[in-house]
Amino acid sequence: MRVKKYSGELVPFNPDSLRHSLSRSGATNEQVDRVYRDIQSHLYDGISTRELYELAFDCLKIHRGAYAARYSLKKALRELGPEGFYFERWIAKLFADDGYETTTSQLVKGHAVTHEIDVVASKGKELLAIECKFRNDVDAKISVTTPMYFMSRVTDIRRLPFTFFGRSQEFTTGWLVTNAYLTADAKSFGSYYNLNLLSWDYPSAASIKVRVDDNGLYPVTCLTTLKDEEKATLLKNECILVRDLLDIPKFLQHLSIDVAKQKQIIQEAEELVRSPVRVD
């Protein structure tokens, strides 16, 4: 059986890949087997990846909303668009969770030109310049020209003093972060020149997907109990993480919803952030 990707390309169906993605939702082995059996009865040659995703999402949601929410992470990241403004805010949260002080959209004067740095992060003697590359296309890939260009920007701002977070520091390294994929050449270039790269699936042991699942850093757009306009309202009011909603439930006062709906949202948020991901 073949699956049609968003680009129209037909590729062989990989049942192991589907099972693994279902497992990453946090569902038990028994639940994964049940969902997989339910999906199998709807499969056909040439099924689109979108339809396959929707089948899995709907089946997982029957078992638990948090499973479907976790499974929808990739889509939820795209909903931080369309321009990627909120994606930058979310990346800042990702680094802040790792102990960094962060700020976004900073202009700095390099040796040759002025640069806008999407996220500046500092911890100890480290000062990071983080470039965020947001993509709406499901199968988008970042080519080697992007890290090449970014490395030239990092070179231009190095060995210069900048004041962030009340102290003067020099940039120590750069990070190129994307919700998309990286081409093989982009990975090779980053590895050779010691440029830190972070994408949906790279590096494999510490990718965006892994870091989010391991630390519960889900964007609020993951929640299945929220409508699109409600997600947009929360983002506009700086509620970026599901965890933000748990820390400050008053964010829900910006939504025109009743108490029962508020309880449903908080319950799903708690299950999503606090329930472990079980992967055998």
Image (spheres, helix red, strand yellow):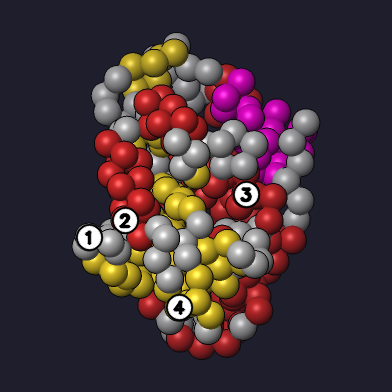
Disc 3 crowd, CA 10 A, few/some/many (<14, 14-19, 20+): some
Question: What residue is disc 3 on?
Answer: 211
Question: What residue is disc 1 on?
Answer: 112
Position of residue 112 measured from the top left corner of the image (x, y, whole percent): 22, 60
Q: Secondary structure at mark 3?
A: helix
Which amino acid type is shown beneath numbered disc 4? Thr
Q: CA distance from mark 1 to mark 3?
A: 36 Å
Which amino acid type is shown beneath numbered disc 3? Arg
Q: CA distance from mark 3 to mark 2?
A: 30 Å
Q: Are the residues flagged by discs 1 and 2 in contact, CB closer than 8 Å?
A: yes
Viewer-nearest of discs 3 and 2: 2
Q: Nearer the viewer, residue 224 or 89?
A: 89
Question: What is the magenta segment's predominant secondary structure?
Answer: helix
Q: Are the residues flagged by discs 4 and 3 in contact, CB closer than 8 Å?
A: no
Disc 4 crowd, CA 10 A, few/some/many (<14, 14-19, 20+): few
- Horizontally, residue 261 falls left or right of residue 134, namely right
